[in-house]
Image (cartoon, helix red, strand yellow):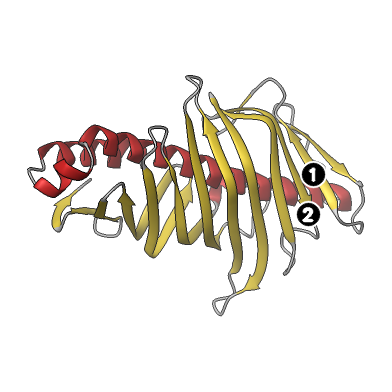
Amino acid sequence: MKKIIAPIIAILLMSCQTDDLKQNLEPTAAIETLNEYVLVQQIFQDVGNNGGDALLNAENSTTGKSTKTISVGPVITIEPFDYTSFPKTITIDFQTGVLCEDGITRKGIISIVSTDWYGNEGSEHTTTFNNYYHNDYKVEGTHYVKNLGRNLDDKLEYSMIVENGKITANTGKTISYTENSLRTWIAGSSTPLNIWDDEYLLDGTQSGISSEGVEYMLTIEESLHFVLLPRNIKSGILNFDFGNVNDIKLNFTNSTITILGVTYPFY
């Protein structure tokens, strides 16, 4: 998304001659806000993906169903190490750095406190971070997930909340982020130990403040359909407001961007 959308919006914003846009927010600030949003959204979606994967691996470890040995990867510990005792703490330690299958290097510790196993309705999972990095970006905040059970299409739904989300670049600049969304697991549930074939729908809102102090808000108008490998949004509509610019719509279904009422294609 970052490689495709941000450059296109940059060109369009630079070429806009509307007085409203010029008076409210400089194009360079708008472009930076868009780039930072794409980054922070990717990081916290990634936390949800890897957290769920770790919980599923933990469940299989405590039942003895999995005998798979991973020679390269994070060290995962489970306390207490049994199937029935809860709450349970799962610690994912990437130590000084692990280059993962998606090309991201992760280091530091993610801790998850769970009230039940990930696939069980009503289970709650609270994730915190200890000196955790996604590439060169330090990640802080609280990531909360609750299993809402299966919908009418027999797909698992999860509520996802990010509170006090904070991303710090190696330059010292910070981006704040909050999220309140609904995530529907639509593909890959039959292979729970492989997150890379997962697909899901995302609904809800996301907001934050850029490193330059620009406030942004995103509302999902039509569910975003995410795939993980390669990372992509297949369809959906996202409304994006930042600063005083309140009229940007990203339509991934028909590959168009609408800015201030004018629609342009993207590929």
Q: Is residue 237 left or right of residue 255?
A: right
* Residue ranking furthest to the front: 23
Residue at image point 78% right, 39% down: 91
Q: In the displayed structure, would residue 139 be above or below residue 126? A: above
Numbered tag placed on residue 140 in the rendering: none
Residue under label 2: 114
- Under mark 2, the amino acid is Ser
Residue under label 1: 90
Say what secondary structure mark 1 lies in: strand
Label 1 neighbour load within 10 Å: few <14, some 14-19, many 20+: many
Q: Is residue 38 left or right of residue 133?
A: left
Residue 130 location, quadrant: top right
Label 2 neighbour load within 10 Å: few <14, some 14-19, many 20+: many
Say what secondary structure mark 2 lies in: strand
Looking at the picture, how far across and down is residue 6, in whole percent?
Answer: 29, 38
Closer to the camera, 257 or 210?
A: 210
Q: Is residue 65 left or right of residue 267?
A: right
- Under mark 1, the amino acid is Ile
Closer to the camera, 162 or 62?
A: 162
Residue at image point 21% right, 36% down: 27
Residue at image point 65% right, 46% down: 142
Residue at image point 38% right, 48% down: 216
Looking at the picture, how far across and down is residue 28, in whole percent?
Answer: 24, 32
* Residue ranking furthest to the left: 17
* Residue ranking furthest to the bottom: 152
Q: Earlier in the sequence, mark 2 or mark 1?
A: 1
Q: Are marks 2 and 1 in contact (CB under 8 Å)?
A: yes
Q: Is residue 142 visible?
A: yes
Q: Is residue 229 visible?
A: no
Looking at the picture, how far across and down is residue 191, in whole percent?
Answer: 64, 54
Looking at the picture, how far across and down is residue 150, in whole percent?
Answer: 63, 73
